[in-house]
Amino acid sequence: MSEKKMTSSRKHHLKSLVLSVAATWLEKEKKDLVVAKEAYMAENCPAPNLSGDQATLMETCKKLHAVIDKVDEERYDLEAKVGKADKEIEDLKIKVVDLAGVKKPALKKVRMSADAMLKALLGSKHTVNLDLRANLKQVKKETKEEPTEAVGDWRKNIEDKADRKKMFESA
């Protein structure tokens, strides 16, 4: 089988087809959600009977208020549970970060003189001159006099060294 590269127009065509299919799925999902909501409301919340005298209407209002109070209590309990779970999740995330440790980024090399570095650290108020040579003591150089006796006969020194060489070679 030989593989053919897709042209850009074919890619765009396939992408538009995928997007159109996804759009139809989203529309169908929205319609299904509306139908499911209507079915739930019809099952759990029947239309109130508003016919009758004032006493029956008052009784219907009391029942509706009782249902509303019950739903509000459930909503409050669920909100508290969700808040507690969110706090637990946040604590666990913090623990994970603490256990894994924070990765430090690699530092970049910066060429900066010592004076510029101190100025950056201490601010412009403190001017520090880091001239290390200025703090050194001035020392006068003394000339060393070599003994003149060692200048003697140079041949004798060479013969002594030759004897040493023979000693190492024989060993």
Image: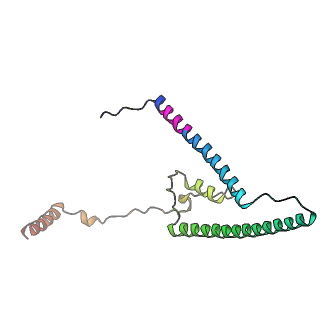
> Which residue is at a point 64% across and 46% down the rendered structure image?
31
Q: Quadrant of the C terminus?
A: bottom left
> Which residue is at a point 61% across and 70% down the rendered structure image?
88
The main secondary structure of the magenta stretch is helix
Query: Picture quarter containing residue 158?
Result: bottom left
**Please, which residue is most extreme toward the front here?**
52
In this rendering, the answer to whether 70 lies above or below 117 is below
> Which residue is at a point 83% across and 67% down the rendered structure image?
65
Residue 25, position as x, y percentages in the image: 57, 44
> Which residue is at a point 56% across and 37% down the rendered structure image?
20
- Which residue occupies the foreground of this view, 170 or 45? 45
Residue 148, position as x, y percentages in the image: 28, 64
Q: Would residue 61 appear left or right of 136 to someone viewing this image?
A: right
Confirm whether the magenta stretch covers residue 104. Answer: no
Number of marks drawn: 0
Query: Picture quarter containing residue 146?
Result: bottom left
Q: Would residue 93 appear left or right of 161 to someone viewing this image?
A: right
| Type of colouring | rainbow
Q: For the magenta stretch, what is the residue range?
A: 11-20
- Which residue occupies the foreground of this view, 53 or 61? 53
- Which residue occupies the foreground of this view, 100 or 143? 100
Residue 73, position as x, y percentages in the image: 75, 70
Q: Quadrant of the N terminus?
A: top left
